[in-house]
Every structure is written in C-alpha cells, then in structure tokens.
Amino acid sequence: MRLPALLAIALAVAVAAPLVPARAAPPSVVTDLPAIHSLTAQVAGELAAPVILLDRGADAHSFQLRPSQARMLQEADLVIWSGPALAPWLARALAGIATDVPQLALLEAPETTLRATDRDNGHGHDREDDHEHDDDHAGADLHAWLDPDNARAWTQLIAERLAALDPENAASYRANAQDARGRIAALEAEISDILAPVGDAAIVVFHDAYGHFSGHFGVNVAASVALGDAATPGAARLARVRDVVERTGAICVFPEAQHDPAYVELVVEGSGARIGAPLDPSGTTLDYGPELYGDLLRGLAEGIAGCITGR
C-alpha cells in the first residue's frame, strides 16, 4: 500500500506546484533592404534574429520572392520594410498573401525626412530617358538610410514596435536602440574625418541616389549619369553630364555596383576626371548583418575620399 500512497502524494505536489509558463518564442521579424535589416538587427540584439528577403547582389526594385520566402512572410510577426514606392514587389506580396501581418514601412513614417532628387543637375530631364523607376516618388530620393538622422529615428521606431510585440523585453530593445544611436554618432564623426580632404571638390555619381549622404556630409555631387536606378542614359544625357564635368572641374566620376561602367567611361572620355571605385548605395554587395550599416556609409566615404585624394 505504500506505493499508491507515494504516488498520491507526488500527484498532489504536482497539482499544487505553480505552473511556470514556457518561454515565448523570439519574434519573427522580416526585413527587405540591407540597411533596414542591419538597423533592425542592432535593435533586436540577441532577442531576435531578423531575416532579410533580398538576396546579396539582387535588385531591390524588381526582386521576386521564392516560395520559401513567401511562407516566411506569411508566418512573420512583423515586417519592417522600406515601403511600396521603393519595394513594389513586397507591397504586392503583402497585399496578396500577408494581409494580416503587422508592418512598419519606414519611408512612410512621419519621422523620416525625405529629400528631393536633383533632376536638374545635368541640365534637365532628357526626353530619351524614358525608364524612370519608383525612386521618383513625386521627386523624392528614397535612399533615406544614407542620412544618419533617419537611421537614428528608425532605431527608435523599430524599438517601439519590437517592444509592443515582446513587452517582456521592451527595456532591452530600447536600450539596444540607444546603443545603436551612439554607434551612429561615432560613425558620423568617423565619416566626417574621412571626407575632410574632399572639401568642396565636385564629383559625379552614377544615379541620383546620394542626396541624403551628400546633403548630410556636405559632399558636392555635381551630376548623376542616369536619372534613376533603372534609367538608361541616352546620348544627349551623356553629353550634358560631360558638360557638367568640364564646367565644374569634377575630379571623379563613380560607377555603381550592378551597373554597366561603360556609361561612366563615356562621360570621362577626353576629360581630366578619374573613374572612382564602384559605389554601392544599397549595400547589396556587403556582408549582411548588424555591422552593415556602418560598413555601407564608411564604404561610400572611403570610396569618394580615395578617388579625390588619389589614394
């Protein structure tokens, strides 16, 4: 009779013991662009592992989801992305297969500052440049992550959305965001030092994606070879940009990752301008992760300064 008695006691103790809730799974967070993924990873820290949909080297404007990525999107707790103007492929996916998934479209947030694209920096719009892309967005430059002020604002927005999703760790997300803002401030100082030798020297970039960076750090971008990431510069456009190179004494003309450098070669032909190393305003050629945001801005600064100084 002792065994049944012991079992009864054990059962009574088990019933009386307080129930300990199982630890909640980390939030499932999906992002679209490298810079947004990087900032989200900084804020999430070790509490979550955000994933990025865009493959390395892929085009952010015309990416197509694989079936596994579509399932990931459907099962996400939160989608942190740029917005429909810059990632229409993701807008279509969200509207079609993930209508109930909460989302944070950073370019649509009132805290985000957008700059107008300088469509006149090559003496106006060419009629033959018919392939404008979604970056136009009523004349706005949507590469807003290149302005550290926007990155700072975004870390706060990301922290608050993660805190709402995972209240137990709200304080940690907010602390991580504060740390991220400290790193951004240090990055700004570092980039200012890198760009100090550049002064007011004029440069020409491949397309009009650098207004946030040049405006924040005071870089003199005299013209862009193309008027958009998907635009094809025609003969008239190239002639106008060559005129800008001559008139401003532009020292460097920069090709861009994933674009044909032949257009840049045509622009510098017969001038004294140098061809710089390809710039990457989106970060798709870099290693994805929390360090990418710093690597991205630092890479732009080093590329510009290196060409101007001849190093």
Image (cartoon, grey):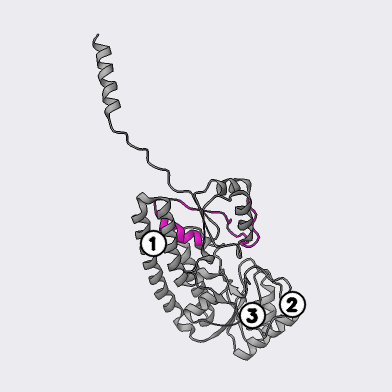
Q: Which element carries disc 3, helix, strand or loop?
A: loop
| Residue 68 location, quadrant | top right
Residue occupied by mark 1: 177
Image quadrant assignment for residue 7: top left
Q: Quadrant of residue 117?
A: bottom right
Which numbered disc flags the more N-terminal residue, 1 or 3? 3
Q: 202 and 73: which one is in front?
A: 73
Q: Position of residue 279 (x, y in %)?
A: 57, 71
Picture residue at 71% right of the left edge, 72% below the top:
232
Q: Which residues are magenta?
A: 36-65
Q: CA distance from mark 1 to mark 3?
A: 35 Å
* Sooner in the amino-acid sequence: mark 1 or mark 2: 1
Q: Secondary structure at mark 1?
A: helix
Q: Residue furthest top?
A: 1
What secondary structure predominates along the stretch shown in magenta? loop
Q: Looking at numbered disc 3 in the image, what kind of residue is underneath it?
A: Arg
Residue 215 in sight in this render: yes
